[in-house]
Image: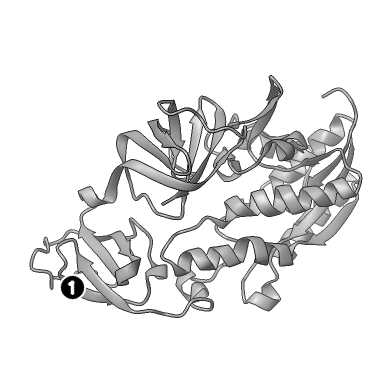
Amino acid sequence: MTKKFDIIVGLSGGVDSSVAAYLLQRKGHKVRAVFMKNWDSDNEGGDCSSKEDFLSAATAADMLDIPLEFVSFSKQYKDMVFKDFVNEYSVGRTPNPDIFCNSEIKFKAFLEHAKGLGADYLATGHYACSELKECQYNLITASDKKKDQTYFLYRLNQMQLAHVIFPVGGLTKDAVREIATEINLPNAQRSDSMGICFIGKKQFSSFISEFIDKKPGRICTENGECIGEHNGLHFYTIGQRKGIGIGGLKMASSAKTGLPWFVAEKRVDENTLIVVQGSDHPMLYKDVIEAKSLHWISGKAPPVGSQIKIKIRHSQSMTDAVIDSCNDILKVKVSRPLWGVAPGQSIVCYAGKICLGGGIIS
């Protein structure tokens, strides 16, 4: 990019977005910064670190000598992301709010705000890359495979990618911190934010109880033998081991001494939690995965029979798969059974380094 542009950077307070702003500034672009507040902790009882984040962002902006604006998208976040988050948990699924925060808030509401301010582009500190090839924008995996964030960005569309820049996507995390240290950024060694902002330091069970009433039900083995009682299916996810409340239980006639219990299935219609023993139990693995609420970055679904790679978690390595069907429902056959496939999470599809899109596991 040789031409000079007016670019607004989403300055989060972390080192990645701060270095992104510096790199654009170094290239001679007009750089402005906006700090987004997406959660109103005073009203919803969360424990978000927005005050600390804003102070860090303001300090970095001052050091870089770029103007910083504070904007709240709390209402949009509550309406577009948080309500869906609660609803998904209430029906037994395990959603990922970061994905919809990106598609609906950061790269929609925030992008519209940036364009309203006259900016040519919006830039963020995400570890991802983009390219324009044959009149189509592609979302490309980052150079740092451990930090790649395309899993969280798979619901972006062509319009969004046309107006977004990822300045650190071609760098490793270590390189980003080295740059920050060289230019004396105060957040050079600041820890990465972890977990969901609106939960903060609270235990998930206590947080979700503020929004979803407890609905006790049976805990059963795969054979239908009742061995305990749960407080509500929304407290559990597929593959969960800790916190089930049956540790060391020997009530089941088929129980195997010493093997831990894992959540294998949530039967919402029966309000029953199915548990199995041992991490290698067959019920914990799936070789066919189905998804709905599909989104394809190019606007076109990949053809049936396509050999692709998939992820069902951000931190997971890619797995080879073949698309069996891809109309309203995506069905993929994986080369090796995957462990702990949880309805509500996302399956994200790749062709080489290109993120194709994906859907919500059903």
Direction from residue 118 to residue 83 in the image, left or right:
left
**In percent of the image, x 43 and y 25: which residue is there?**
306
Q: Is residue 245 above or below residue 18?
A: below
Q: Is residue 166 visible?
A: no
Direction from residue 318 to residue 110 in the image, left or right:
right
Q: Nearer the viewer, residue 213 or 200?
A: 213
Image coordinates for residue 321, horizontal then vertical, percent: 38, 31
**In percent of the image, x 15 and y 61: which residue is there?**
258
**Chosen colour scheme:** one colour
Q: Nearer the viewer, residue 261 or 350?
A: 350
Residue marked by disc 1: 226
Q: How many marks?
A: 1
Image coordinates for residue 21, horizontal then vertical, percent: 80, 41
Q: Which residue of the protein is positioned furthest toward the left in this rendering?
A: 253
Q: Is residue 255 above or below residue 347?
A: below
Q: Is residue 38 above or below residue 125?
A: below
Q: Residues within 10 Å of mark 1 (few under 14, many from 20)?
A: some
**In percent of the image, x 35 and y 57: which residue is there?**
238
**Image quarter for residue 255?**
bottom left
Q: Which residue of the protein is positioned furthest toward the front in this rendering?
A: 327
**Image quarter for residue 151?**
top right
Q: Secondary structure at mark 1?
A: strand
Q: Which residue of the protein is positioned furthest toward the top in this rendering?
A: 134
Direction from residue 36 to residue 285 in the image, left or right:
left
Amino acid type of disc 1?
Answer: Cys
